């Protein structure tokens, strides 16, 4: 469930929160003055190809199953993620953040929730030193209707993030090696890392309320707020290390519309929208939507309002974390129905999202420093 919320912050806290977010933006903007990817580099960004096949795709097919917290499907999804990173991306750390909670439909029984974090930092950093691009999706599915899969909600976003991590890995390795050889690193702009956060318990068990929703996100935001780094660390706690919290949700249906929700992070939205626009003009995307996936690139700052869609970012946003919410709105027609399955996905749209998000992450991490050589002219498809 996602719920539209017309109030960004509680009455009486609007001015302090906006001032805080504005200050945060001023602090982080100089750090991320990254270089746009060249046309050549954009042409080398892979789509994931057969790995998104709904029957036997390596990334997506194993999670096109019901994934309700506390069920075997939850365990199977967790094992899929962990095996992928452990076997294919061994340089990424793996952390579990476990919690339990009662729900309105399970009585006094404590339901287990497990958030999974996969992180790649520069090898020279100490605790609390790196700023982290944080790419997020929830992996649980609704308890009802029985057998609900949630392909767009959010199996596809999870598979996309696995693809992003796999694509980033070789470039991150090369960059870290070159920086180490040159004696670089050790400064806030240089010490960039990336983490993939897969959250559990986003869905309500009965009806979306403050306590019946966002189980994993609420527990983790609270834990990170109260987990302090050593006294001399640049960042106080894990929340402070998040340079941008990019949340993917409800992706995979044809003709999506993803608005820009927050004025304070519209600059990041524009960066992703620009990537989509450039890729379309270069003929690198497969889908033919009625309009861009990200149509608000030129949205006037005076047209932003206080409304937003409640989702896993909410407890992090309440603690001052900058948010880029990549969610289809209006919601896909299959939303919360049995038709939200693999058969109803639009695969060109899925692969295009994989390319767009991957290019955004490469650009954020300043990977033009390790741009592939010009010899390979054919756009990557795998």
Image (tube, rainbow, N blue to C red):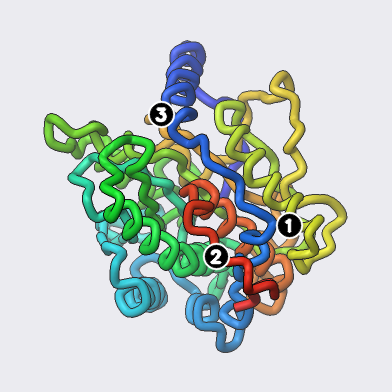
Tell me the crowding category of disc 2: few under 14, some 14 to 19, or many 20 or more residues within 10 angstroms, Cα based: few
Residue found farthest to the bottom: 56
Quarter location, residue 80: bottom left
One can see residue 12 in this view: yes
Give coordinates of residue 138: x percent, y percent. Answer: 46, 58
Q: Secondary structure at mark 3?
A: loop
170 relative to 185 in the view: left or right: right
Q: Residue at coordinates 35% horizontally, 60% vertically from top-left? A: 106
Q: Which residue is mark 1?
A: 279
One can see residue 101 in this view: no
Q: Nearer the viewer, residue 350 or 44?
A: 44
In the rendering, which numbered label is found on residue 320?
3
Q: Residue at coordinates 66% horizontally, 37% vertically from top-left? A: 260
Q: Residue at coordinates 49% horizontally, 48% vertically from top-left? A: 366
**Is tag 1's residue or tag 2's residue first in the polypeptide sequence?**
1
Q: Is residue 342 above or below residue 107?
A: below
Q: Is residue 272 above or below residue 289?
A: above
Q: Which residue is mark 2?
A: 372
333 relative to 105 in the view: left or right: right
Q: Is residue 361 above or below residue 18?
A: below
Depth check, mark 1 against mark 2: the one in front is 2
Give coordinates of residue 301: x percent, y percent. Answer: 69, 22
Q: Secondary structure at mark 1?
A: helix
Give coordinates of residue 56: x percent, y percent. Answer: 56, 88
What is the C-alpha distance between the residues marked 1 and 3?
32 Å
Tell me the crowding category of disc 3: few under 14, some 14 to 19, or many 20 or more residues within 10 angstroms, Cα based: some
Disc tally is 3
């Amino acid at each position: 469930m996602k719920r539209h919320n017309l109030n960004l912050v509680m009455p009486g806290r609007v001015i302090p929160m906006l001032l805080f977010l504005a200050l945060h933006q001023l602090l982080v903007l100089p750090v991320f003055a990254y270089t746009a990817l060249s046309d050549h580099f954009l042409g080398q960004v892979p789509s994931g190809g057969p790995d998104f096949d709904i029957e036997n795709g390596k990334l997506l097919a194993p999670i096109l199953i019901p994934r309700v917290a506390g069920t075997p499907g939850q365990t199977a999804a967790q094992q899929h993620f962990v095996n992928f990173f452990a076997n294919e991306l061994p340089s990424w750390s793996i952390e579990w953040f476990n919690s339990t909670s009662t729900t309105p439909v399970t009585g006094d029984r404590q339901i287990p929730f497990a958030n999974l974090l996969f992180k790649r930092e520069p090898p020279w950093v100490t605790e609390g030193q790196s700023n982290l691009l944080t790419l997020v999706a929830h992996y649980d599915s609704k308890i009802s209707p029985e057998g609900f899969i949630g392909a767009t909600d959010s199996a596809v976003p999870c598979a996309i993030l696995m693809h992003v991590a796999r694509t980033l890995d070789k470039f991150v390795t090369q960059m870290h090696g070159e920086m180490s050889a040159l004696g670089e690193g050790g400064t806030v702009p240089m010490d960039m890392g990336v983490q993939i956060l897969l959250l559990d318990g986003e869905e309500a068990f009965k009806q979306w309320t403050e306590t019946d929703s966002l189980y994993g996100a609420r527990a983790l935001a609270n834990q990170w707020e109260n987990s302090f780094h050593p006294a001399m660390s640049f960042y106080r706690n894990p929340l402070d290390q998040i340079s941008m919290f990019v949340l993917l949700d409800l992706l995979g249906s044809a003709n999506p519309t993803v608005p820009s929700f927050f004025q304070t992070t519209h600059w990041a939205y524009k960066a992703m929208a620009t990537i989509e626009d450039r890729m379309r003009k270069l003929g690198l995307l497969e889908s033919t939507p009625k309009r861009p996936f990200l149509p608000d690139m030129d949205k006037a700052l005076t047209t932003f309002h206080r409304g937003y869609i409640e989702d896993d970012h909410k407890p992090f946003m309440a603690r001052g974390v900058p948010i880029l919410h990549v969610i289809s709105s209006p919601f896909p027609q299959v939303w919360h129905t049995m038709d939200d399955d693999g058969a109803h996905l639009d695969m060109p749209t899925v692969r295009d999202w994989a390319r767009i998000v991957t290019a955004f992450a490469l650009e954020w991490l300043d990977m033009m420093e390790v741009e592939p050589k010009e010899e390979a002219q054919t756009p990557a498809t795998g």
